Structure formats: C-alpha cells, structure tokens
Image (tube, rainbow, N blue to C red):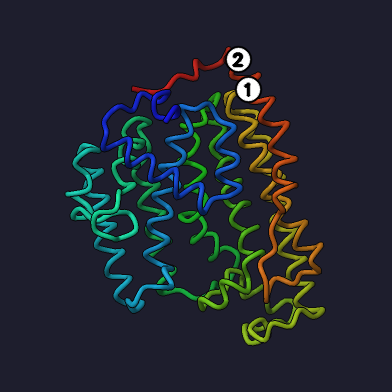
Amino acid sequence: MGELDAAGITDPRLRASYARARALNAAHGRTYYLATLLLPPWKRAHVHALYGFARHADDIVDDLDSALTGDERAIQLQAWSARFLAALRDGVPAHAVDAQIAGGTGAGGAAGEVSVLPAVVDTIHRFALDPGHFAAFLSSMAMDLTVTGYATWEDLLVYMHGSAAVIGLQMVPLLEPVDDSALPYARDLGLAFQHANFIRDVGEDLRRGRVYLPQTSLALFGVTREHLAAGVVDGPVRRLLAFEISRARELFRAAQPGIRLLHPTSRDCMRTAFVLYREILDEVERADYRVLERRVAVGLPRRLAVAGPALVRAARARRRGGAQISSRPPR
C-alpha cells in the first residue's frame, strides 16, 4: 500500500476504503486506471476515491442484476444523494460517514462490503473540493432514470455538465494547476471524454433505453431511434456518427492546451488519458462505425505503447520535482 503511505493515510478504516476504490478503478476503469499510474503515488489514492464515488452512483442507476424498478432506483438514489450531500454540508468526519450516509452498507450495496465513501469524503476534505460538483453529478445520474433522450446539443450539455464537466473540475485540485485558468480546459476535457464514450456506446446505451446523441443530429441525417435499434449501420448512420466524431474532436482540441497548465508531475497522466480517449474515435472509424452491435476499444498493446514512454517521462518529472508547486500531499 505504498500509495496510501505516500498520501499519509494511516487510519485502518480509511486505508480499507481507499483500497476498495482502487480495486474498482482497476477492475472497471482500464484507460482511466492506466493513466492514474502515471501520477505521483500520493495523488493516485485520491483519484481512485473519486472514481469509486462515480462508480457507486452509476451502479445504483445501471445495475443490470438489480430487481429494483426504475422508480425504486430513483428513490434509492435520491435518498442516498440527500444523505451524502447532508454529510458534506454538516462536516461529518470521513471515518463516520458510512453510518451517516449508507447505514453501514458498502459501495455496492452489500452489507459487510468495504465502502468507498470514507475515502471519498476524506479526499473532499483534504482538497477542499466543491460540494456543488458532487451535487451536479448526482443530479445528472438521477436524469438517467427518467430521461431517455435529448432534443438538442444544448440540452445534452445540461446533462453532461453534471456527468462529465464536473468530473474534470473535481480532478483539477488533485492535479495541481498553475492557476485557475486550467478550469475551463478541464471542463472541456471532461466533455470530450464523455462524448467519445457516447459515440462508442450508442448500441449499448440504446439497449438501456437511452440515446445520448441529440435528436437534432439524428433528424439532420434522417436517422430515428428505430433505425438505430435495427442495428444496421448504413449511410445515414455513418454520416451521423462522423458528424458527432467531428464535434468530439473539436472538444479535444479545445481542451488540449490546459494540460500544460498542470503541475509537471500531472501532465503525463493527462496526456496519456487524452491520447487514448481521443483514439476511441479513431477506432470507431476503423470499425466502419459499427458500434450498434459491438463495443470498439483501444487495444491493450496500443494502450501500453502510449503509457510506457509516459511512465519514463513521469518518473523523470517526479525526480526533478516542480518549480511551480511543491507537489506534496495535503494534510
């Protein structure tokens, strides 16, 4: 547990919670987890904690093994969100947060399972993260239980603010920005990552009853939900996806300058994530846009080819230290 030692996390309950978050990130994050390994050890634990929080909320919404109805999930998410936000507002200590929020149940909802919540609250306290970012995220998760589509790009951006943009904003303090000018770039990068995922996951999302491409885009190319549900990738579907890929690439272009505004020990992490998420779009094109019946992905050899040299650069940056910011774990 070198990461936890480096972060100065000594409480056994907190260490178990952080370890649980790390396991979730390793099991489900893939590209996200790989990029996290490029950070200094003390930063990694806190990135894992934020991932664990998002994963917990997502499991409430999209657990395919759950017997709960959509309305029951909405009630569960609303109650859990209210308790979590109240705990932040009331300053509940990290070690006591499980009893306050989850009644002793774990992140996955199973009694006796180690919860990620103490790690999340500890990270929020250490970095003075804005509780409003977490409220916005939970609001977007609630939308997933009631909203199945978005009329315009602007409507979709309302959802993406909470589901993606605030993820970037949560991360900024951990990555040690040079100044607050990094924030708009972090927002755009969160949007770029998520829109790339939306394009990759059109078929998977449709099977959950949702479409995360604007209805105006579908109408522009003569595509309907029924058309997508048929699973046939024809000319109109290809043109629709090519249009959305161009939109995603513009978000990546807008976000890229912000990487240089981070501490040197954080840049290789974000460059690696940037490259690999952007290459999702390349993989969709290589697959001839066939995302309705399968899920394309950047292969492991390519992920390692990008991350390998970055590991060397990141190690050098840590040895040199940083002239702008001390890069030490917060108390």
Q: Which residue is mark 1?
A: 315
**Could you say where residue 99 lies in the image, as x and y percent from the top left?**
17, 49
In the image, taking residue 327 as reference, residue 300 lies left or right, namely right
Estimate the spatial distance between the alpha carbons at disc 2 and disc 1, rounded to whole Å.
Answer: 6 Å
In the image, taking residue 34 as reference, residue 162 lies left or right, namely left
Decide: few, some or many residues near mark 2? Use Cα within 10 Å; few <14, some 14-19, many ≥20: few
Task: Relative to 195, say whether 225 is above or below.
Answer: below
**Could you say where residue 62 lies in the image, as x and y percent from the top left?**
43, 68
Decide: few, some or many residues near mark 1? Use Cα within 10 Å; few <14, some 14-19, many ≥20: some
- Residue at 30% from the left image edge and 48% from the top image edge: 114
In which quadrant of the rendered view does residue 76 lie?
bottom left
Please tell me whether mark 1 sits on a helix, a strand or a loop: helix
Please tell me whether mark 2 sits on a helix, a strand or a loop: helix
Quadrant (top left, top right, bottom left, bottom right) of the N terminus: top left
Quadrant (top left, top right, bottom left, bottom right) of the C terminus: top left
- Residue at 66% from the left image edge and 30% from the top image edge: 311
Residue 280 seen in render? yes
**Could you say where residue 160 lies in the image, as x and y percent from the top left?**
52, 58
| Kind of residue sitting beneath label 1 | Ala
Task: Relative to 71, say whether 282 is above or below.
Answer: above
In the image, taking residue 149 as reference, residue 135 lies left or right, namely left
**Could you say where residue 228 lies in the image, as x and y percent from the top left?**
66, 81
Identify which residue, 105 or 268, lies in the foreground: 105
Residue 91 seen in render? no
- Residue at 41% from the left image edge and 68% from the top image edge: 63
| Kind of residue sitting beneath label 2 | Arg
In which quadrant of the rendered view does residue 233 lie?
bottom right
Task: Relative to 83, say whether 71 is above or below.
Answer: below
Tag of residue 319: 2
Q: How many marks?
A: 2
Tag 2–tag 1 contact (CB < 8 Å): yes
Tag of residue 299: none
